[in-house]
Amino acid sequence: MSSKSKLKVIPLGGVDEIGKNMYVVEYGEDMIVIDCGLIFPKEDMLGIDLVIPDVTYLLKNQERLRAFVFTHGHEDHIGATPYILKQFGVPAYGTRLTLALIEQKLKENRVSQQQVPLRVVEPGDVIELGKLSVQFIKVNHSIAGAVALAVHTPEGVVVHTGDFKIDYTPVDGGVIDLNALAMLGSKGVLALMSDSTNVERPGYTMSERKVAETFKGLFEHAEGRIFVAMFASNVHRIQMVIDSAARLGRRTCVVGRSMTQVTKIAVQLGEMVIEPGSLVDVDDVDLLPDNQVVVLTTGSQGEPMAGLTRMAYSEHRKLTIKSTDMVIVSANPIPGNEKFISRVINQLYRSGAKVIYESIAEVHVSGHACREELKMMLTLTKPKYFIPVHGEYRHLCLHAALAGEIGVPRDNIIIPDLGDIIEIDKHGIRKGGVAPTGSVLIDGLGIGDVGNVVLRDRKHLSQDGLIIIVMAIEKESGMLVSGPDVISRGFVYVREAEELMEGTKNVVRGVLANYDRVEQSDWAHIKNKVKDDLHKYLYDKLQRNPMVLPIIVEI
């Protein structure tokens, strides 16, 4: 078998991290990509808005790329689509809600459907993509339209679970298709790629209906307005809140751009049914008695610009939290967001509101499988080889150990790193090299124009500030005619540090005194000498190391 005809699986994102999901499956001349997600920036990525996968490998092999296929519509699986899909022009396949959310993202970024053909599939459908075919299998998750994928290849079947849990009583009545998974297992699954997010949690994930029961009890005892913050993508829970409010004679106000957009799309697709009169516009909330109002908003992660945060700090244009309100935060903090949501909850308490969150009531259930459900997936599919995905490195290791407990031989398990080219056949599984991979940073409209050097400078500026030295030099004589002038930003307040500023100027004058006549060819050397001498002087004085930026002006 030629190396080109080998079955390969390559994670370009989604391993050793929760987010940025993107997985390549290829055989011979045919290649598909599963998901195209983003991850939110780490705290040290100052000014960065989003982080998406590096698709250099796809660009090098784009003549073999047949399609993008999507498991569901969460940001960590579709968020990078406006930036990446337009580069390839191949079809994107997904369920109705998933593609509707992708279409909205493409419109917002002015990407036309001519550039990215969107093709709707239903659970149970099979699409042919060269020598690869993809079967879509219904699963439960915290968004409608979630599917697992069975990629049929000449070497065997590769099952990608997507994000899933096993919910026997889902809100929409659509139970996970365990039969389809078992059928695949009975025929023989070559490799399983499975969601590892909740592998640390024992037992089973609670059903979404448990949240409905909690909401019912809380709503019945609330005397004033009720605010519910959650992920905008959780369509079933939005429906649950609106229905619970209507049963108690309350009307629901939907606040936040993403919450409003998703609700509108879900209603258009029939994923949600809202009875006439159930909703109220934000401008009309004050016209209703407090005990007839429910407000659905974004901000469950404490995002600075989200609805709940602005309401808590009295910065929202229409709504402010008050002491008679009940606020329900119906979400788990995403890793890294704990501080943000903690600040918002503290502020809500300062407002005097009654605050309910997961630590004190069952107002959220995860959309990811716990250990017993992960075991069931392994048992049903009976994979020969196992690749844990969608998790930080400890999650992948624990999931690998779990597969070992179920009976998968250790030699048949690969714990992947980003970019690993995993080769699979009936004789074994191995790492056969590394594809180019990494992260592309999105800052405003800039895509990939901010790299490590820029981030390093931003960090330096944020921690130590900036000193600018301006010197004017006459072009003809090469002599200093003005300055040096000192400008400080984020370092010291100049008017209160006159002695330090004068000392700074003297250091610069001392550097220039070593040159009888400053010529243009000496400017780079002078700038470097000014930087070095000032760094030493300022560190000796203050034990601080600002960025020093010398500027020579020719007049």
Image (cartoon, rainbow, N blue to C red):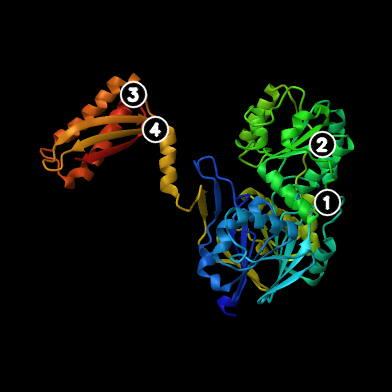
Question: Alpha-carbon distance for marks 4 and 1?
Answer: 53 Å
* Neighbours of disc 4 within 10 Å: few (<14), some (14-19), many (20+): some
Earlier in the chain: of badge 1 and badge 2, it is 1
Q: CA distance from mark 3 to mark 1?
A: 63 Å
Total numbered badges shown on the rendered structure: 4
Q: Which residue is mark 3?
A: 494
Q: CA distance from mark 4 to mark 2?
A: 51 Å
Which residue does the numbered mark 2 point to in the structure image? 251
Q: Secondary structure at mark 2?
A: strand
Distance of mark 1 from mark 2, alpha carbons?
29 Å
**Residue at x-position 50% and y-position 41%:** 44
Cβ–Cβ below 8 Å for labels 4 and 1? no
Question: Is mark 4 in CB contact (under 8 Å) with mark 2?
Answer: no
Q: Earlier in the sequence, mark 3 or mark 4?
A: 4
Q: Amino acid at mark 1?
A: Asp
Q: Label 3 crowding class (10 Å Cα cut-off): few <14, some 14-19, many 20+?
A: some
Between disc 4 and disc 2, whose residue precedes? Answer: 2
Label 1 sits on residue: 167
